[in-house]
Amino acid sequence: MTFIGMDHGTTGISFCIMSDDGDVIEVFKIGREESKKGLVNVTEELTKRTDLSDVKLMAITYAMGDGINQILPASQVKDRGILSMSGAGKVTGGGTTVFDELEQLNLPMVMIPGLHKDSTSLDELFRAAYSHQASPEKVSISYNAVKETGWSNFIVADISSNSVDILIEDGRIKGAMDACLGAMGVVHGPLDLEMLRDIDENNASANGCFSHAGAIKIAGIDGKVANMKDQLLDNYKKGDEKAILAIDTLIMTVAMEIAGLDIVCENEIEGIVLTGSIGSATEPFDFKDKLNKYFKGKYPLKVISKESGAIGAAQIAMDVYGGRKEILGIEVNI
């Protein structure tokens, strides 16, 4: 008996295959470009790693997840659980191909919602303030963080192509800050005044600005999303001043966002969980050490796997199959 979790990430789609005792059998990733071009077949990749007849449940994330607010059977979800395929954060195709292939497998499958204004599980103040707070994989990341730490009151900092920080209070997701609002990631970041003017004057699109508002803006890097992080880190290793400034600025914005979420938590924060390709990094810099410079040892900092999105989704699948009726305050309706 196995369970599968899927993380629909910015640079690729990750899968975790988990045994019924909670052990991770394997985690693998399919690049967006390879999927979009038909160079990789999801069915083949899964079947060579596990017997699909043994899969009891798969939990998947897709795009913004703003069309649903419960964990639901995929067969009951309309339009893949999203409200729009255009604008900032638009669907680009690679993940859609994977989704279509998974539907053909006819495996028992549930979809995890994103965090947004219609998420009745969230604090009403966050819902009133922000139309969108986080995509569905941030829910599975947070679930893996709970499993890894046992904490009930903490902040998850997922730092990679984008940066999203999530506040968990009393074992429930209270709210989050999306990539377009606060902290920079490598690629995505907040839309500042200059970008808003460019959009108003038709010199740029919202999605174009959003996709160049992260650390790469400071480092002067452009190109394919899948390559930008490696280019930034390579420049950092070489001592490039713009790359160093970009990383240092990214970390400062993350620290500010975490501090803001700490303020609105009514309970004492037990710690901060770091994940994502940058949040878990130890080379060419130690992200945890650099972040702790701002907090001066105030919080325990726990680094979990950068594949926590896929792992957490598999853990959700296992627990939903086992009868759980809510996940981090989100209702399960199957």
Image (cartoon, rainbow, N blue to C red):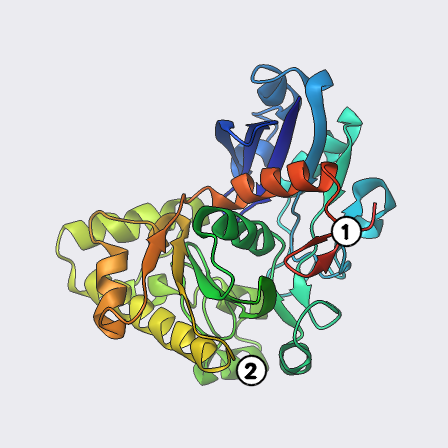
Q: Is mark 2 on a helix, strand or loop?
A: loop
Q: Nearer the viewer, mark 1 or mark 2?
A: 1
Q: Is residue 50 above or below residue 260?
A: above
Residue 297, how many percent across, how many down? Answer: 24, 68
Q: In this view, does 162 lie above or below 109?
A: below
Q: Is residue 38 above or below residue 158?
A: above
The quadrant of the image that shows the C terminus is top right
Identify the residue shown where x is 65% and y is 52%. 63
Residue on which disc 1 sits: 332
Q: Seen in the image, is 210 located left or right of residue 99?
A: left
Circles 1 and 2, Cβ within 8 Å, touching? The answer is no
Residue on which disc 2 sits: 201
Q: Is residue 316 above or below residue 165?
A: above
Residue 62, how many percent across, how many down? Answer: 66, 48
- Which amino acid, mark 2? Glu
Q: Seen in the image, is 64 located left or right of residue 242?
A: right
Residue furthest left in the image: 239
Q: Seen in the image, is 327 located left or right of residue 184?
A: right
The quadrant of the image that shows the N terminus is top right
Q: Quadrant of residue 218?
A: bottom left
Between discs 1 and 2, the one toward the N terminus: 2
Q: What element carries label 1?
A: loop
